[in-house]
Amino acid sequence: MKITLEELRAWVVVVDCGSITAAAEQLDQTTSGISRALSRLENKLQTTLLHRTTRRIALTEEGQIFLQHARQIIASVEAAEEQIAQRREIPSGRLRVNAASPFMLHVIVPLIDGFIQRYPLIELELNTDDVVIDLLEQQTDIAIRIGELRDSTMHARMLGSSKLRLMASPAYLAKHGTPQSVADLAHHRLLGFSQLEQHNIWPVRQADGELLQIKPGIGASSGETLLHLALHGQGIVRVSDFLCREATASGQLVPVLAAETCEMRHPINAVYYRNSTLAARISCFLDYLSEQLASKNLL
């Protein structure tokens, strides 16, 4: 037995209007269509809900009992529709955002205060992973991905791109010397990724014209860890602009082989699943992030 909401509404309107003809006019349907809906409802319930004559209708005892439930069901559906409509106008609910820890700490976290002030009804949950996650498995609404996208099943919104640079601390260079050529890097400790080999391609060309693929002297799974290794004088690192901006401004890190560095940028995308209409809490976060990144030149 599968009673439809349309059948329930038709029956309640018939009761309220007092006739099938009046109900048909109110619902903008034919009298035969309303009559068939009532017959289907009674067949599914295997009971008579209305006594019908040419002049009036009267509820049976079963009809009186069922009417209360039907009104409650219709009211619940209408309340749910109204609540969803309100959420579209005033974004609310839990929003789960995932990003690699460096991007979360250096880009997203400084912007959160403004977002909360603008959308106080959204409950933020910020999670970090330095590897690509499954959005559905991790119950994530939005994931920030750095680098080329490989999963075509998701929607993506381009947030910008970040330039890659070679950096080291003044203390490291004072102790080990400053490289004057790409070949000199072979005599230095290079800091790189232990798991993401594609991130160990550096934006400088070897004598044969190929980009340098390094073998890390110290490897780490997180760009944040590599940044702190460089800050503590442990070697030369390839790092994104957004990650080293503060350290560069303060002089804690300085460029290495700036003249030899090629223009290499990592695209940064927000990815999400979208089956139909995008939830307001997701779209407002994407809009806010794009707006802030552009206005503050963070990428």
Image: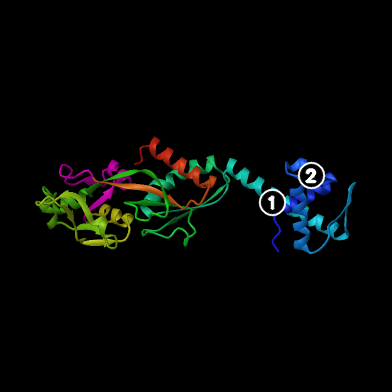
User: Over which residues does the magenta segment extend?
Assistant: 235-263
> Residue 52 at what x, y percent from top left?
87, 52
The image quarter in which residue 255 lies: top left
Residue farthest top in this picture: 295
Q: Amino acid at mark 1?
A: Val
Tell me if 92 is positioned left or right of 199 in this view.
right
Which residue is disc 1 drawn over?
Answer: 77
Quarter of the picture containing the N terminus is bottom right
Task: Reply yes or no: does residue 249 show up in magenta.
Answer: yes
Marking on residue 272 = none
Kindly identify the residue that appears in the image at 19 percent across and 61 percent down: 215
Task: Reply yes or no: does residue 220 show up in magenta.
Answer: no
Marking on residue 23 = 2
> Residue 259 at what x, y percent from top left?
16, 42
The total of numbered circles placed on residues is: 2
> Residue 244 at what x, y percent from top left?
30, 47
Q: In this picture, is 114 found above or below 198?
A: above
Kindly identify the residue that appears in the image at 36 percent across and 58 percent down: 130
Of the two numbered discs 1 and 2 on the same chain, state the one appearing first in sequence: 2
